[in-house]
Image (spheres, rainbow, N blue to C red):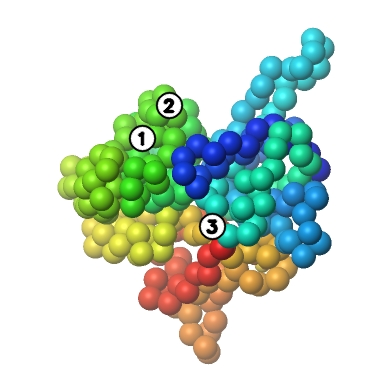
Amino acid sequence: MKNYQTIILANQEIAPGYWRMRILAPGFAAAAQPGQFVMFRPEQALPTMLRRPFGIFRTGCLPPECAGLPPREYMELLYKVVGQGTRVMSELHAGDRVELLGPLGRGFTIADNACAKLLVGGGIGLVPLFLLAEALIRRGHPVRLLMGGRTRDDILAVTEFERLGVETYVSTDDGSLGEEGLVTRVLERKLAKYPCAEVYACGPMPMLTAVEQICSARQVPLQVSLEAHMACGVGACLGCVVKGVGHSEQQPNYLCTCKEGPVFAADQLDWGRLDVRCEE
Ligand code: FES
């Protein structure tokens, strides 16, 4: 983990309400694991504006600016404008200074077995799945991405996954892109075809709950990335805890989303009482 004061390289709207920010981050590409996140804050932000958590979408290297200099490592965030903090982010420009803390948290675990790897993303929930897809493909696993959204505007970066060699299946609630209906219906079909499968999911809680029910009924291993409200990102404030399996008042089992997650094996969590507070 490193504390960066760095600059934005680009910040563009890629679909209505969805933005992509590229940030200079030396030493980051090798360090970031699929599923990890950063705490982000504009340097010029109001003192009341706290750092906010964002999943790492991509990392990479640009050629050096001049001969003899090292390549420029960067990381990218994909975010949706949903409140004042993300609106302020969308008004930042290349060259603006930002503070980053990261990479943070525990990411996805990859098992090198022959089971099909199914990635399920709902809307902006696809963010942590790109580095995961890259890592799986690097290790020789075919990857299938099941991507769902309310409308076509919620379906992001599919061609980037396809360029990696990922097979993609898109569904939208209104049928404006791909198949009409919920992504969980596509998952049920894929699990009928690939009974030996491992599922990795990120998205809104109703989608994750449905994915968990589908996977547990078929005894398919599932890892989920939770999108929780976080104030510190490093295990200090306990603002991000969720209830783990077997939790009771007598025997509390709280899990810190920022330190023990944001990725959890589904059987670590108490799905009936998760009560995740998301960022706004
Ligand atoms: Fe503070 Fe997790 S965000 S403990």
Q: For mark 2, does the 10 Å Cα neighbourhood hold few (<14), some (14 to 19), or many (20 or more) residues?
A: some
The residue that mark 1 highlights is: 143
Q: Amino acid at mark 1?
A: Val
State the image quarter where residue 51 is shown: bottom right
The residue that mark 3 highlights is: 82
Q: Could you tell me which residue is drawn at 45 percent across and 68 percent down?
A: 269
Task: Return the disc, 1 or 3, that comes first in the chain's sequence.
Answer: 3
Q: Amino acid at mark 2?
A: Leu
Which callout, 2 or 1, points to the residue nearer the camera?
2
**Image marks 2 and 1: residues in contact by CB distance under 8 Å:** yes
Q: Could you tell me which residue is drawn at 70 percent across and 38 percent down?
A: 93
Q: For mark 3, does the 10 Å Cα neighbourhood hold few (<14), some (14 to 19), or many (20 or more) residues?
A: few
The residue that mark 2 highlights is: 164
What whole-number distance in Å separates the C-alpha atoms at marks 3 and 2? 30 Å
State the image quarter where residue 27 is shown: top right
Task: Return the disc, 2 or 1, that comes first in the chain's sequence.
Answer: 1
Taking the image as drawn, is residue 116 in sight?
no
Q: Position of residue 138 (x, y in %)?
A: 47, 28
Ligand 1, seen in the image, is in the quarter at bottom right
In the image, residue 277 sits, relative to residue 2, either above or below, namely: below
In the image, residue 214 sits, relative to residue 158, either above or below, namely: below
Taking the image as drawn, is residue 113 in sight?
yes
Which callout, 1 or 3, points to the residue nearer the camera?
3
Q: Could you tell me which residue is drawn at 48 percent across and 55 percent down?
A: 225
Q: Position of residue 39 (x, y in %)?
A: 68, 53
